Amino acid sequence: MSGTYLGMPAFPRAAATATRDTRLRANLTHATRTIRDKRAKAVAELDDWAELRAAGAAVKDRTLRHLDHYLEQLEAAVTAAGGQVHWALDADEANRIVTRLVRETGETEVVKVKSMATQEIGLNEALARAGIRAYETDLAELIVQLGHDRPSHILVPAIHRNRAEIRDIFRREMASWGRPAPEGLTDSPAELAEAARLHLREKFLSAKVGISGANFMVAETGTLVVVESEGNGRMCLTLPETLISVVGIEKVVPEWQDLEIFLQLLPRSSTAERMNPYTSTWTGTTDGDGPQTFHLVLLDNGRTDTLADTVGRQALRCIRCSACLNVCPVYERAGGHAYGSPYPGPIGAILTPQLRGLAGPLEESLPYASSLCGACYEVCPVAIDIPEVLVHLRERVVQGGPVTLGGTRTVLQPAKGHAAERAAMRAAGWAFDHPGALRTGMRLAARTRRLHPRRLPGPGRVWSRTRDLPEVPAESFRDWWQRTRGTSSGRGTWAEPGTSSEPGTSSEQRGDAK
Amino acid sequence: MSSRDLVLARVRQALADVPGGEGPGDGGTGGQGSAGPPVVRDYHRVHGSRTQAQTVDLLAENLADYRAIVHRTDAEGLPGLIGRLLAERGARSVLVPPGLDASWTTGADVTLVEDRVSSTARELDRVDSVLTGCAVAVAETGTLILDAGPGQGRRRITLVPDHHLCVVRVPDQVVGSVPEALPRVAPDRPLTWISGPSATSDIELDRVEGVHGPRTLEVILLSAAQRAD
Ligand code: SF4
């Protein structure tokens, strides 16, 4: 993945720093609670939500099981409609392709629609090295870019910034990127948005190259779909002469009709709206309307490795709605930066280690960045069982096992000298220092328990029998806490396997595993 | 091997667990093992049952809920209404797509600017308002769908000016739901779905209308002419 996040400390350390930042926590708490409540209302409006969710998951699963077929179909349809399709195995190759395509236009500036895929590959930095300036045009991305910052939320990347900070960033930085902030700019959201409008309009009206991602690609028709609110997407997709879209191979859906599912699931899950203000679809190029040159760069970058893992594969269903972030007690405390990749929160905790192949301390610690309360699974519009994948990845970290890395099947060794367990313990230690996160997690867990079977998947069952990690609620977390920590004031200690004397879920769990 | 072939080869290798007999279109029955994941479309085509008039009312309600300004009139009242709305905004120039019904603008005292392939984005930026029709409107979500048809023009014209006036013929251009809308538009045309004016919630999740697209969206629900009886 991108160089942007290399050198990030492992999750527990980054999270510990973040939780000490009271302003960050106040911003995050306000934002996630607001959006969480709104989402619940928007979802409750549809009495067939469960059916839509099941259909969304099924369409994505079907697609993933025949991804080669749908990618070839997509390529043929895009090409027939006048587009050019490129394939990139990894971030470097994708960056090289995009850089070359921009150079061929003779331009040195591009306007960008917010896109997770281009953040993942570090495209802006790669373009900068080639002397090409990329302007982010989504308001939040603009705030992040001007603030020399990193995004911390999938949907609202500047969620960690409040209005006063944004005003300061605009006043300080806008002039060096183009039109300066208006005189006497206050911190009212309307004025800040207006400042961004004026600042960026110059770019939109003169840009010759636009770069985007896509929310969906329809194999049957070759259509790409971008869902947005501000109209910056429409600007970038419509006004430039050349459009380059960088899209992960998992974003394909089979048929036009499938959009009826996702265009209902996505807006309500992400912004809690019945429909987002703008949705753009295009199929290749259209004479006299919009860009006359269209390039689609299909990105692997660890996705085929993820696809090879039959438990972890479901992470590729993700439609990046961010609902799981907003309900996650750990995310709310730790903030998005702690996850060390453009994908924060529960989805980041399972996607990043898979895309990067459990390659280092950060990736090894991410599967522990969770209380396994199950709230993320409950809100996920495509029913990704994030707790199941987390437990599966914990097992990989601790016990090793078969994985695919760079397309090659291999056997991952258990981390040497119990490094993995140390990573896990650090994560656990972090959680113990932040009992608020745990309490929230437990409350949610209690509420969702009925909905969420506690049995761990296949090999995880064996593993949980012998390794009773604190976050695995083989017994209720509260019981475990009382038993191991209730009277002690020291750091959390490792619970020895099989020491619970309590009946109930814990012994059922073990009974299952035998 | 090209990267294309490598990616496809990796995909195929990754899918070694998928039974060879399972085709991409299989699985509708949801049977054992090799059938693959069934896609059951047992969600609603439309939510609830409504008369045509109620569907139009719901459209108006949801449009207004997302801060579009909604007006109603019939063919006879349309030119006057359009003239009045443009005058109230002080609009002096109005972009019109080539195929727009010429009678719509007869009551407006404004300069009509026709969009041409050669007009630049800067020229469009100097125009006060844009007037278009639409292809389909979705009641449940309060969405207008433009498909670049004759009365709608290129995508950019409803994007650059700050004021968009959109005429929807009711009830024939109104559908209830997203599943009812998709079959009515052609995927090979560029589509723009519009639900309220441009908006952002990026600053402390406060919704602000109008960042980069039109800050004001006015929708005219145009009913068939009243019969004199
Ligand atoms: S994992 Fe599910 S809830 Fe989280 S962002 Fe992806 S689709 Fe949304």
Image (cartoon, coloured by chain):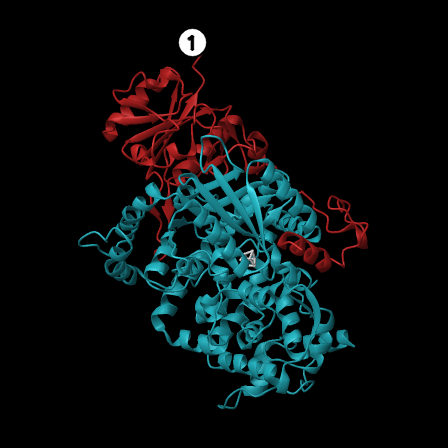
Chain colours: A cyan, B red
Callout 1: residue from which chain?
Answer: B
Q: Nearer the viewer, residue B123 or A184?
A: B123
Q: Hey, what amino acid is under mark 1?
A: Ala
Answer left or right for A19 relative to A186.
Answer: right
Q: Nearer the viewer, residue A390 or A135?
A: A135
Residue A88 in the image, given as x and y percentages of width and height: 57, 55
Q: Where is the C terminus of chain A found, in terms of image quarters?
A: bottom right
Q: Quadrant of residue A217?
A: top right
Answer left or right for A506 relative to B142.
Answer: right
Asked if A510 appears above or below A202 in the picture, the reply is: below
Residue of label 1: B228
Residue B44 seen in the figure: no
Query: How many callouts does the rendering have?
Result: 1
Tell me which residue sits at (47%, 67%) in the image: A3
Residue A484 in the image, given as x and y percentages of width and height: 58, 87
Residue A302 in the image, given as x and y percentages of width and height: 60, 62
